[in-house]
Image (cartoon, grey):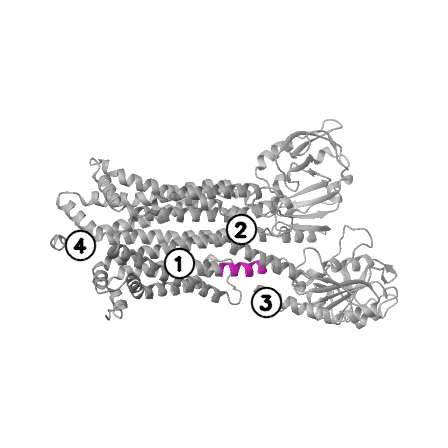
């Protein structure tokens, strides 16, 4: 018998709501799986981009360096790369009978990256320090050489970036080092002029070979190609030089970051897919209920359950496929909103398309199976129902949460970490806060279902709005509990994702501050401590001088809190004010786990702890702090540093303007490798994005549930108003009905997420050897935003419910 299969797709148009729900279901499902693929791919590219910001651009490709070569050999080797340099050993060039420490060098393009103070053109370019020491003027000739001084330039100083970064050890002098240990470079005009130098520079020359990349590398595959090309070049040269391969480490770190993100997201994506497929099954059941008469007719005419199941695919298949395609398109267009970067690995979009194709095929398979099962139960055999709702899923998930907590408590993020390494994230430990949220959602759903079943005993007719709201909730217990479940998951995942991501950002900043001590620091000579050199006025109020000896700091109580990174400056200021020396023993602050006894630190008097703090800038959780007035011989202190609240560039600019020598600079913004923190932040950032998707699902489900019950609401509301109920009471009733669901979802999700994140955040620490541990950020604004969005949805849902009442015609409704 020929059955009317061809008319099935056209028949689907008679149920636009079912079509819309089918499209939205697979749209969100496709978006989640495609976005997870694209997010993981962009995480690798973002990690590579971050690594390049911390890498000298001229050492992105493998580089070569060497020392102790004869000058002709060094020049010959340097010419084999596009950017080769030769540096002579430090000697004492003589200008006009005045010899000073200096070295010569040549690097193509060097003069374009120097600040000229006098002169220019071909000839010797002498740094200002050497010109001042040897009283060099333009036109002077170096003794023993025909070379003439043509320019005087400003010495390079830390921090150097970009073009000079890879040559810093050769071209940036250390003004605090001893005579002859470090010096600026006297630049010649070409490699050939190196042969015209005075005697004494023929041997022990240094050489550097660089292969600059024109543009920053975008993807891991591109970086691997550049690395292999660099390896081939170096192998073909066969030079006896030391190889530097920074790119391999960056590639490995980027690949590890990408794998960490993808493996951490996998459980969440699997759960999301299962939830989406359950939604597809629900839509199919509703379709079978709407098509009951037609399906019975086809069954009577000989169609079996499997054929009727494929009939469901004919009607719902096209909307499901269309939703998947729209999900893929949305994941690509919205990439800048949820991913750490916009650059994707080659083929990532095809992988995402394949993932969407898989979930669409699964959706179609679920449609066939559910439709076949439904028609089999309805028309062929009534089997005893085995309800999944009877299974205590919340207890199962709670047990998994306990196991995840055990893993998290024991291992933290995962593998045992060392400084400078990227952690391999333990996915089981990472899922703890999400499992707690899921447990709370399941418990809330079961309790809500039980409460709605028992609500028929409640008599609140003194408050008609509440009584009517409760009756409507009880009549729609299934949709209500479903919306509540998804709503709790949405609020919880948004809060957990935002909390952990925010904690990682603040932890990186806090740990960097403790590591440096302030926003920036620079080592200076003891002349400042001795009062021989004064700080410029521009650094007063934002800079302090700190001495450092083995395990102890020497601070100035009057200025320390102006610059140091402190959680409670008032407490530190009070404790430091109490450290007044009255005898041979200097009172000190004991930090963290340091011994509470008198101790002798080299360069300092005998220290006696009189107070304690759990942690302190630079020292972390171990060490001692003494005030400067308690140290009689400041010249015996190991080293002196300026700590400043200013950015490093501003600090060094002011020091250079004042003529104050410095070295060993540190910048809070760059001192730590932030990739481990960023990896966790990117992972939970996507968790928050999934939460937003779930929030959209919950809101749409709530509005659709109201729309499906429009006829019932219209009859009930119209009759109520005809019987004397005021419109304001009916409005309040719908607000109470929908508002109760939204408020419960926000309250339960927020409490579960805040509690679980509060326990998990301190243990999700990519750098546990550094204090302080990550702390839960202030989520008040996030909670306020969720309440505001929930209120908008509640008002919209109540308005939608009342719209049918206002436009209802009693005759048509009763008919």
Q: Picture coordinates of residue 70 (x, y %)?
A: 84, 67
**Going 25% across and 51% down the picture, which residue do you hit?**
799
Residue 470 location, quadrant: top left
Instruction: Calculate the distance from the C-alpha at mark 1 to the C-alpha at mark 3.
Output: 31 Å
Viewer can see residue 383: yes
What's drawn in magenta, residue-wise? 38-49
Q: Indicate yes or no whether the magenta region holds residue 43.
A: yes
Left or right: residue 317 compared with residue 687:
left
Of pointers 4 and 2, the one earlier in the residue sequence: 2
Cβ–Cβ under 8 Å for marks 1 and 3: no
Q: Is residue 330 left or right of residue 565?
A: left
Q: Which mark is residue 222?
A: 3
Whether pointer 2 and pointer 3 mark residues with C-beta atoms closer than 8 Å, the reply is no
CA distance separating discs 4 and 3:
63 Å
Q: Position of residue 171 (x, y in %)?
A: 74, 60
From the image, tell me which residue sits under label 1.
29
Q: Spatial distance from mark 2 to mark 3, Cα to Cα?
A: 25 Å
Is residue 721 shown left or right of residue 386?
Answer: left
Q: Determine the residue positioned at 88% across, 61% down.
A: 97
Please, is residue 399 above or below residue 192 in the view? above
Q: Which residue is mark 2?
A: 680
**Height in image: 95 above or below 439?**
below
Indicate the position of residue 557 as horizontal and vertical percent values: 65, 36
């Amino acid at each position: 018998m020929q059955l009317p299969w061809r008319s099935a797709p056209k028949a689907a148009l008679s149920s636009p709501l079912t079509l819309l729900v089918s499209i939205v279901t697979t749209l969100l499902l496709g978006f989640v799986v495609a976005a997870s693929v694209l997010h993981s791919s962009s995480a690798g590219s973002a990690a590579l981009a971050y690594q390049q910001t911390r890498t000298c651009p001229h050492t992105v490709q493998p580089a070569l360096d060497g020392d102790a070569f004869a000058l002709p050999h060094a020049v010959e080797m340097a010419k084999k790369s596009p950017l080769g340099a030769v540096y002579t050993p430090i000697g004492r060039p003589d200008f006009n009978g005045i010899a000073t420490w200096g070295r010569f060098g040549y690097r193509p393009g060097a003069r374009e990256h120097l600040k000229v103070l006098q002169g220019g053109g071909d000839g010797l370019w002498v740094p200002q320090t050497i010109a001042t020491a040897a009283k060099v003027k333009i036109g002077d000739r170096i003794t023993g050489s025909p070379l003439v001084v043509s320019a005087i330039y400003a010495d390079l100083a830390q921090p150097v970036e970009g073009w000079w970064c890879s040559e810093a050890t050769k071209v940036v002098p250390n003004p605090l080092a001893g005579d002859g240990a470090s010096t600026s470079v006297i630049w010649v005009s070409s490699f050939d002029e190196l042969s015209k130098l005075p005697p004494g520079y023929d041997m022990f020359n240094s050489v550097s070979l660089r292969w600059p990349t024109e543009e920053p590398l975008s993807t891991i595959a591109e970086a691997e190609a550049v690395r292999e090309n660099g390896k081939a070049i170096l192998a073909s040269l066969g030079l006896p030089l030391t190889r530097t391969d920074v790119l391999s480490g960056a590639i490995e770190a980027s690949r590890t970051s990408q794998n960490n993100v993808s493996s951490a997201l996998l459980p969440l994506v699997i759960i999301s897919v299962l939830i989406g497929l359950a939604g597809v099954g629900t839509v199919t059941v509703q379709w079978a209920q709407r098509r009951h008469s037609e399906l019975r007719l086809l069954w009577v005419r000989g169609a079996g359950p499997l054929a009727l199941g494929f009939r469901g695919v004919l009607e719902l298949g096209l909307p499901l496929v269309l939703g998947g395609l729209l999900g893929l398109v949305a994941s690509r267009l919205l990439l800048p909103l949820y991913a750490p970067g916009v650059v994707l690995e080659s083929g990532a979009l095809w992988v995402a398309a394949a993932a969407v194709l898989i979930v669409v095929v699964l959706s179609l398979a679920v449609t066939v199976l559910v439709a076949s099962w439904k028609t089999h139960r309805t028309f062929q055999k009534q089997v005893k129902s085995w309800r999944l709702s009877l299974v205590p899923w919340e207890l199962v998930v709670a047990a998994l949460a306990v196991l995840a907590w055990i893993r998290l408590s024991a291992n933290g993020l995962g593998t045992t970490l060392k400084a400078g390494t990227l952690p391999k994230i333990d996915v089981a430990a990472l899922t703890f806060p999400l499992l707690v949220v899921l447990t709370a959602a399941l418990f809330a759903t079961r309790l809500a279902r039980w409460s709605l079943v028992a609500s028929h005993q409640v008599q609140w007719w003194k408050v008609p709005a509440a009584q009517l709201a409760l009756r409507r909730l009880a009549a729609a217990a299934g949709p209500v509990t479903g919306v509540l479940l998804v709503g709790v998951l949405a609020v919880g995942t948004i809060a957990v994702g935002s909390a952990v991501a925010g904690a990682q950002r603040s932890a990186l900043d806090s740990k960097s501050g403790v590591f440096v001590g302030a926003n920036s620091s620079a080592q200076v000579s003891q002349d400042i401590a001795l009062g021989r050199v004064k700080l410029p006025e521009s650094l007063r109020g934002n800079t302090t001088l700190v001495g450092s000896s083995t395990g102890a700091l020497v601070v100035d109580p009057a200025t320390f809190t102006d610059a140091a990174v402190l959680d409670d400056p008032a407490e530190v200021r009070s404790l430091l004010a109490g450290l007044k020396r009255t005898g041979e023993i200097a009172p000190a602050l004991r930090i963290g786990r340091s011994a509470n006894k008198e101790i002798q630190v080299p360069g300092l008097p005998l220290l006696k702890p009189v107070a304690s703090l759990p942690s302190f800038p630079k020292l972390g959780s171990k060490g001692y702090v003494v005030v400067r007035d308690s140290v009689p011989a400041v010249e015996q202190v190991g080293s002196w540093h300026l700590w400043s609240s200013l950015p490093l560039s501003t600090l060094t600019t002011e020091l250079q303007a004042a003529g104050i020598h410095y070295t060993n600079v540190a910048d809070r913004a760059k001192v730590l490798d932030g990739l481990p923190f960023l990896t966790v932040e990117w992972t939970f950032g996507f968790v928050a994005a999934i939460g937003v998707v779930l929030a959209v699902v919950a809101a749409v489900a709530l509005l659709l549930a109201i729309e499906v019950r429009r006829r019932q609401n219209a009859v009930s509301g119209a009759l109520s108003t005809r019987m004397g109920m005021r419109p304001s009471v009916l409005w309040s009733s719908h607000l109470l009905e929908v508002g109760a669901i939204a408020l419960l979802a926000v309250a339960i999700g927020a409490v579960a997420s805040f509690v679980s994140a509060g326990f998990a955040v301190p243990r999700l620490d990519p750098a546990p050897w550094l204090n302080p541990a990550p702390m839960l950020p202030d989520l008040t604004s996030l909670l306020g935003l969720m309440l505001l969005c929930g209120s908008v949805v509640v008002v919209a849902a109540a308005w939608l419910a009342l719209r049918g009442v206002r436009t209802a015609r009693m005759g048509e409704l009763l008919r």
